[in-house]
Amino acid sequence: MLNIDKIRADFPILNRKVHGKPLVYLDNGATSQTPQSVINTIVDYYSNYNANIHRGVHTLSQEATDKYEEARIKIQQHFNAKHAYEIILTSGTTESINIVASGFASILKEGDEVIVSALEHHSNIVPWQMMCEKTGAVLKVLPMDEEGALRMDLFDELLTNKTKLVFCNHVSNALGTINPIEEIIHRAHKFGAYVLIDGAQACPHLKPNVQELDVDFYVTSAHKMCGPTGVGMLYGKQELLEMLPPYQGGGEMIATVTFEKTTYAGLPHKFEAGTPNICGGIAFGAAIDYMNSVGFDNIQTQENELLMYATNELLKVDGLKIYGTAYKTSVISFNIDGIHPYDIGAILDKLGIAVRTGHHCAQPIMDYFKIPGTVRASFSFYNTKEEVDLLVSAVKKAKAMLS
Ligand SMILES: *Cc1c(COP(=O)(O)O)cnc(C)c1O
């Protein structure tokens, strides 16, 4: 069991007030809050050893390089990648997906096929559409059902020997659905297709094992798992990262440069052109340490309890509908009959409660349910039942004011 008071004390922001009320932060699906240990790591970096990495002979540069590469190893171990150089540090999930999509834009051919799930975030749709435009590859969609689960019964009909890539999120940010990625990877591999899994919404809740999953690419962002914004990871199997062309040209990603011919650096530097987010990468490592010190079993127990409690309490509100009831993590996407989600969100904010409203960068899901958007409350392990009670009473208040 978690000592929630002790956990909450790790997050200074949870003490602040919003409109005179204690902050109730339920927008963890958009970004998580930052524990003191990660904040300290950032302060320590800029206070004591800020320097550019991999290039300097001087002490600060060596220290920064060592810490940055230590962070890469922490990330490797956390996700159980075989080699540290299979972990590319990027600016986040979006950039990670773009690196892979732009690489395949010079590999795929007209008539090749790729499959996207209906549950995707725009960042796992648009880069692939751009790739298809360039190559003439065909984008097919694996549909979802009323409960927000993927129609796995239709997957085999979509797979052919022309299928080159399948991309899917591990957990849907809009509904919280946990997708059966083991099965997706296994079935796609039977057709020789590669699979990219978007783990941005999964990594705050669980610990993926990329070798056990046998996944080809796995991507995530630090800022949803207690780390800073502007840094994330692209994991790829060595042979695939070697096959893909570099994404950006510049310093750090080269072996030799002449005006006649440039040769590229090996992994991971081939995909890390220019000065990276050094402090962010080091802080990403600190965030992983923090999450592991809390423990993913504890995280899941606490979050599942909050999810069940909040679901039961919210469903007691007349006219409230929850979207996505499949097997899921601690996300509740809902609407109240006849009320626009934005209006509910604005009233909740006045009461100190932070939720997200809108399409959650997943318009196709909203189109499926024929709604403009939802109110989304997304929980973290540092949230409490008391906060759920505040949410529910605020939702009732908003309903009374708006109907
Ligand atoms: C947040 C999120 C993204 C985008 O992450 P960025 O950090 O904005 O690049 C992509 N997919 C899912 C499922 C997400 O939750």
Image (cartoon, grey):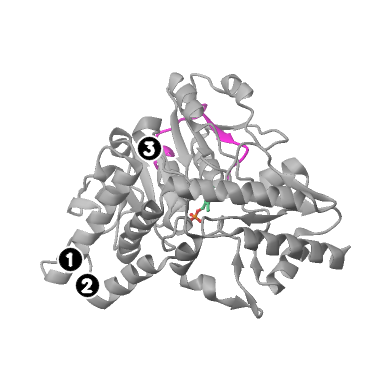
The earlier-in-sequence mark between 3 and 2 is 2
- Upstream in sequence: badge 1 or badge 3: 1
Secondary structure, mark 3, is: loop
Q: How far apart are marks 1 and 2 (CA)?
A: 7 Å
Please give the residue where the numbered disc 2 appears in the rendered image: 49
Q: x, y percentage for residue 331?
A: 62, 50
Q: Name the residue under label 3.
A: 209
Q: How far apart are marks 3 and 2 (CA)?
A: 33 Å
Quadrant for the C terminus, please.
Answer: bottom right
In the image, taking residue 387 as reference, residue 224 lies left or right, namely left
Given the image, on which type of amino acid does mark 3 rest?
Asn
For residue 102, above or below residue 158: below
Q: Looking at the image, do the residues carrying marks 1 and 2 touch, with CB atoms under 8 Å apart?
A: yes
Nearest to the observer: residue 356 or residue 92:
356
**Residue tagged 1:** 63
- Measured as percent of width and height from the top left, residue 316 is found at 79, 51
Q: Is residue 183 above or below residue 118?
A: above
Q: Does residue 327 appear in this view? A: yes
Please, what secondary structure does the residue beneath circle 2 have? helix
